[in-house]
Image (cartoon, coloured by chain):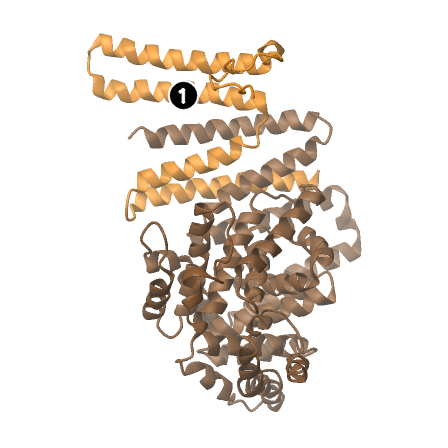
Amino acid sequence: MRELTKSLMSYTWAMSVFGVQQMVNLLTRGNGDPWGKAAHAFENVTDATTKTFGGAMTETFKAGDSLQHGMIDIMFGGLTLGVNPSRWIRVGREAAQRTGEATRDTTQARSPTADVSPGTFGSASASGDWGPMPR
Amino acid sequence: MSKLPKSVVSLCWASFMFGMQQCVDLLSAEGATKAKAAAYTARNAIQEQFSADPVFFALDQIGDEAQRETVDLLCDSFRLKPLDPSWLGRTWGRFVRGAVESASALTPGGNLEATWQGLRNTLAVIRFVNQASTTLNLPPGEVRLLGAVDRAYALGGDYAALWLVEGLGEEYAERNWALAAQVRGLLKSGPAAQLPEKCLLMLHAGMGISFARRILRPLTPYTCDSEVAGALRRFVSLVHDNARPGYDGPALESLGLVTRSWYPQMTSLIDRHLWTISREALEYFWHGIGRGTYFNPRYLIPGASAFKAIGNEAPHQLARLNGTAGAAWAFTLVNIRQPEVLVHLLKKEGTTLGADDAFACGVASTVMMSLDTLPDNGYVLGFCRFQPTSADADLVARWDRMVHTPCQHATEHYFPLLRNRGRLGEIFRYQNLERLAASLEGQH
């Protein structure tokens, strides 16, 4: 219990220091592209964190992540799209579509019927990748 | 423009899901171990982001240590340990000793001067190491090793070149690792065959850092034994496959340096496995732990001593001797241009450090390594000739026994012998140098 507490607190502490580091880097504006570097650092940590997830948790993460990204696209779109309703509708539809796809993936990943049954070589998997090839 | 906010919200969401995953894991069998392993992996990924930023690295390390001690203290309090007089004496004793040592190190006069000078030297070296890649400014793609070595010597001058060459070795190994599935003969054949001898020790040390980080990154203290043993065997064989004969010592030593700096929780696990895999690698490993301990931010706090930490933490004699030699190696190299800092160390801790020859071995090894890597500089011989101007006869005698005489033997006898026999890599672990020299002469 003691070690578990230490491990989780250690993670929390490192995450806090990381946040401060990125904030300082962005505010001090070093050489190169500080925004790109910060985004890369955030992505690295996100990747490492999601690698510790189980299958269902990964899919849930992807679904939520897609939804959030869609919302950010809408938000940034709002700044640049002006008052063109058709473009608003298109951006909204794309975000909804991406979230729907991710949710479907999650459901299929958790459902036993989504497994590829023996003999169905070549059928696409839930994520749309190629299935195993017959020899 | 939207990339940064997206990556920020992704991380926030991932952190929330990470918490959920830990809750789910804790409900299952072996859940606590899984949760600890996951927290360890995620934490290390964050820590990697501090690699080029010593201030945040130090903040993370010191804060982490403080929170661990706080958790221990709270847990002990819940178990009513403060009611036990021996626990109370031990805990308070530690705090009071720490405070007194810090106060003593900061007392104006000789103590403060030596503390300040030592700290400045250490921070300068940390800066050299962290900026090695930026300073060398290697173009993307294949590293032209000969040109890069010349550049490192030209840019680094008569001192920083050491660290630039080490950084170059790490970068060279990293890039080759990315190019080929299996690296072989990195510093043995190809362009490396033409390299001047003076750069070989530190290039091998840098290559070892790259290998050690690659090997240790996927492991956790909760990884199964067979996987850890396999990874360590792979590290040892990688070093043997890529190091020149007689130069595998500095590369093997880097495993300890990387473990102490980045994966300290792996120390006991690696120690346990190396006993059965390779005793030679174990000795180098503990020497590297000593070197890493000296550079650990926790021991940069005035009053804290890396030597005392090694004495307290070393699980056996081999670890203590090699760890002390490694820390002495780092301490001497960092402060070689200001021998007064070393005199001050002997004044404070000379009695303990003089109990065996580990410290003297570390000092002699540094001198040999510097003579080999930086043959044109004068300060190494200046360091060897230095005599403290102190009225304290004990201190002068201690300096003579622990620094002056070992340096004299090293420059006049051991160094030419080891270099001629191609065994300079041996100086990266603790051993009786006189016996080693005698055995090499006997072989001849």
The quarter in which the C terminus of chain A is drawn is: top right
Q: Is residue A49 left or right of residue B279?
A: left
Where is B372 relative to B400, above or below? above
Q: Nearer the viewer, residue B156 or A89?
A: B156
Q: Is residue B390 left or right of residue A74?
A: right
Please identify which colour was used for chain B in the image: brown
Q: Position of residue B9 (x, y in %)?
A: 41, 28
Residue type, mark 1 in image: Gln
Q: Nearer the viewer, residue B13 or B135?
A: B135
Q: Which chain is orange?
A: A
Q: Residue at x 39, y 42 (%)?
A: A22
The quarter in which the N terminus of chain A is drawn is: top right
Circle 1 marks a residue in which chain? A
Q: Position of residue B384 (x, y in %)?
A: 50, 85
Q: Nearer the viewer, residue B406 or B356?
A: B406
Q: Residue at x 46, y 29 (%)?
A: B12
Q: Which residue is mark 1?
A: A68
